[in-house]
Image (tube, rainbow, N blue to C red):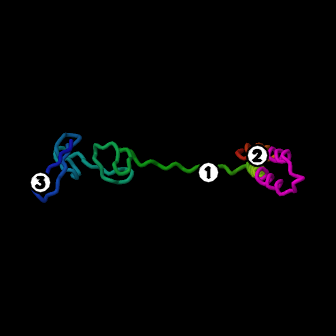
Amino acid sequence: MRHIIAGKSGETMQQIFACPRCGTSNYWGQPYCSGCGAPLTVSCPNCGAWMSSSAGFCTNCGAQAGQAAPQQQPVQQQKPASGWARVGTVIFALGVLIIIAGPVFLMLRPEAEQSTATLIKVVIAGAVVLIIGLPLMFKR
């Protein structure tokens, strides 16, 4: 329950709100209730910003009121790649190279030596090498 009271001309407006404990009207910014002495504002445990004691979450950082700052989890380091993963990466890269460079190399040959059958064989060979290297790349 918040009210805004306007004073005389030139005065600033004050917000009044009810104490969540006893219901007494208090001005915004007072640290304690004038009726029961309960704290009206508390600092956020995460960022330190002042917030209403009845607020469930901090309006500055979104942390839940009444909870300590979250502890950071230690970063788990990944295991280094095994020897098979390195071999798989090399085989996979070789397959990509065969698929890309094979047809280019065939096109540079004289007309008499170019054939569609040879091109298909080169692409299939590159694909087979890719298929062999791919699962090995992810072996840990």
Q: Earlier in the sequence, mark 2 or mark 1?
A: 1
Q: Secondary structure at mark 3?
A: loop
The image quarter containing residue 24 is top left
Which residue in the protein does label 3 denote?
7
Which residue in the protein does label 1 denote?
77
Q: Verify whether residue 99 appears in magenta.
A: yes
Q: Secondary structure at mark 1?
A: loop
Q: CA distance from mark 3 to mark 1?
A: 62 Å
Q: Which residues are magenta?
A: 97-124
Pointers 3 and 1 in contact (CB under 8 A)?
Answer: no
Q: CA distance from mark 2 to mark 1?
A: 29 Å
Vertical position of residue 13 compared to residue 120: above or below: below
Q: Residue furthest right?
A: 112
**Residue 140 seen by the camera:** no
Q: Earlier in the sequence, mark 3 or mark 2?
A: 3
In this orientation, which residue lies closer to the viewer: 63 or 70? 63
